[in-house]
Amino acid sequence: MPTGNALLTQMNTIPIIPNSLAFWGMGQMGIAIKGPDAILCIDPCLSNIVEDQAGSWWYRAYPPPIEPETVTNATYHLASHEHEDHFDTHTVKPLAKASPNARFVAPAWCRPLFTKAEVAEERTIIPKALEPITLPGTSIKLTALPSAHYEKEYDEQKGYRWFGYLIEWNGVTFYHSGDTVIYPGYVDMLKSYPTADVAMLPVNGRDWYRETLVGAIGNLLPEEAARLAIEIGWGTVIAGHNDLYPNNTISMGSIADAFAKFAPRQPYKILQPGELFYFVK
């Protein structure tokens, strides 16, 4: 799999045909997406920020597939919430300089992080949850959908704290859930929007020990992800959030077992860092 400049070249040169999108794994819940008129990155964590701020329990399992200061081709950067492994200021700051025309999308809770990353306010977009927008300069229809990590938190001034993103682009619908668990009304909300052809979900589960020992807020259990995919009717599931920090993962076999038991015909993928998944509808 390409990394560094080779990965950047692949992104820049790969053609995008109608009814398709190209996806590249960035680790954790990070992903890059190319369509006909833009390159997006969602939740890339390309630094050691978590270990630096929270301690050695959070060591990285592998280096980033690309260094943020070399990302010269980003059109948009989306962050689902303010946790460092999703809004990495050590990634955003150099990326914003390397891609000076890129714009940045996040919940209002992330405003202090934009300041910390030296991203000018005019480069930011704070979408209102549940209301579709078209990202300026592109054909991307974006809808921010509330997630729950663990609660669906809401503030009168800042809105919902945790976002997922529904992206309708080039005939393909993609859902990036951000970090979440299933909450009351979540399934009905998802059913009220276009069904995703590709859905990326956090499947590293949750347990008392991770929560209490290091404050690791968990996510969907593999069984929940598999059953949710069947209930919603998603196409391919990308199983995320289960590779970057070894102490905050579950066995890959448990993911396979859950899908084999509860969704045996459900396509799913586990993307390696830098791996290309070219989806054609």
Image (spheres, rainbow, N blue to C red):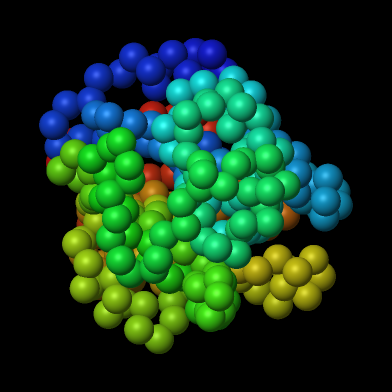
Residue at 80%, 66% in the rendered image: 214
* Residue farthest to the right, as pictured: 55
**Is 76 left, or right, of 280 in this rendering?**
right
Residue 246 screen position, x and y as percent: 69, 49
Task: Choose between 21 and 112: the one closer to the eye.
Answer: 112
Q: Where is residue 163 in the image (x, y as percent from the top left)?
A: 47, 63
- Horizontally, residue 113 falls left or right of residue 174, namely right
Is residue 55 visible to us here? yes
Quadrant in which residue 118 is drawn: top right
Residue 204 falls in image quadrant: bottom right
Residue drawn 80% across the image and 47% down it: 51
Please name whichever residue, 84 or 114, is drawn nearer the observer in this view of the structure: 114
Query: Which residue: 59% across, 51% down?
Result: 86
Q: As drawn, is 89 to the left or to the right of 262?
A: right
Q: Which residue is drawn at 52% across and 37% down?
A: 26
**Is the residue 175 above or below the residue 244 in the image?**
below
217 lies above or below 176 = below
Indicate the position of residue 241 as horizontal and vertical percent values. Answer: 55, 53
State the count of labels.
0
Taking the image as drawn, is residue 174 in sight? no
Query: Please, is residue 252 above or below residue 23 in the view?
Result: below
Quarter of the image with the C terminus is top left
* Location of residue 11 (image quadrant): top left
Q: Position of residue 71 (x, y in %)?
A: 54, 24
Q: Which residue lies furthest to the bottom in this view?
A: 184
